[in-house]
Image: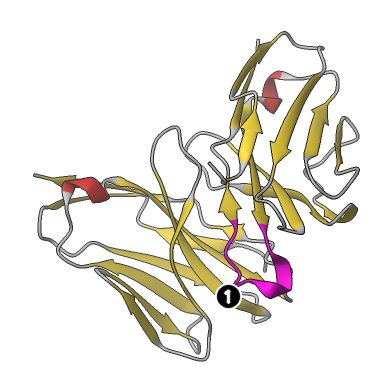
Amino acid sequence: DTGVSQDPRHKITKRGQNVTFRCDPISEHNRLYWYRQTLGQGPEFLTYFQNEAQLEKSRLLSDRFSAERPKGSFSTLEIQRTEQGDSAMYLCASSPGDRGTGELFFGEGSRLTVL
Amino acid sequence: QQQVKQSPQSLIVQKGGIPIINCAYENTAFDYFPWYQQFPGKGPALLIAIRPDVSEKKEGRFTISFNKSAKQFSLHIMDSQPGDSATYFCAASGSGTYKYIFGTGTRLKVLA
């Protein structure tokens, strides 16, 4: 399977705990995006990387959220001191950037439940 | 200006019907308008996309109609099938970032 891979698929945690999600993009895709999707809503943009550089962060990404893509390959999204409002599906997507058609290829998401 | 407004929220059609989903945007800098299909428990997958230099694009049973002056675009699904039952999202992006702004989604149910 050469699609976008996300891990874990499901995470249940208690309020106040830290969680980390990992995303492995399609090989050679230089752009990587994180989105958050709550029930009944469309995905909301959080941040994106071109190679290892984080080019944009949404205002939705509070100080408790941090994302990295250290070697321009996989990425991690960490949420510190989780709150119940953080419960959502966290989607990762990748694209070949300017060499592509504009399509974002999404993973199946990591569902977070904060108790 | 960053919003994309999508309607209806839900839609039920008979098999063979032609569901139509509409989206409207404000930001004239948007230059790429994709439609994504999402099944429960799965990530969104691209269905069809259009750029503002054309008014219509067809791919199989799916057609996008685009009205640049009205800043509106719509998805038509011809000869709809029960397997088309899913949630559909329109989106818009611009400036080469492919940072999508998504609509709120339309839950489509096609009855057999």
In-image side of A113 versus B9 (left or right): right
Quadrant location of residue A56?
Answer: bottom right
Give the residue number, with chain letter if any, for mark 1: B32
**Foreground residue, B10 or A80?**
A80
Count of labels shown?
1
- Give above or below for B70 relative to B103: below
The x, y position of residue B18, in whole percent, is 18, 65
Q: Residue at x 59, y 73 (%)?
A: A101
Query: Which residue corresponds to the image point at 53% horizontal and 82% vertical from the top-left?
Result: B51
Is disc 1 placed on a helix, strand or loop?
Answer: strand
Q: Judge by depth and name the residue closer to the eye, A77 or A16.
A: A77
Prevailing SS of the magenta stretch? loop
Amino acid type of the residue tagged 1 in the rendering:
Tyr
Q: Quadrant of the C terminus of chain A?
A: top right
Residue B98: in magenta span: no
Where, by quadrant of the figure, is residue A110 drawn?
top right
Q: How is the image coloured?
A: secondary structure
Q: Is residue A5 above or below residue A80?
A: below
Identified at 53% across, 72% down, the residue is B33
> Which region of the structure is painted magenta?
A95-104
**Which chain does the numbered disc 1 sit on?**
B
Task: Give the x, y percent position of residue B39.
Answer: 38, 41
Specify few, some or many for label 1: CA neighbours under 10 Å numbering under 14, 14-19, or 20 or more: many
Task: Look at the picture and state if B79 lies above or below B9.
Answer: below
Q: Where in the figure is residue A112, as x and y percent of width and height? A: 63, 23
Identify the residue at horizontal 75%, vertical 58% (top origin): A31
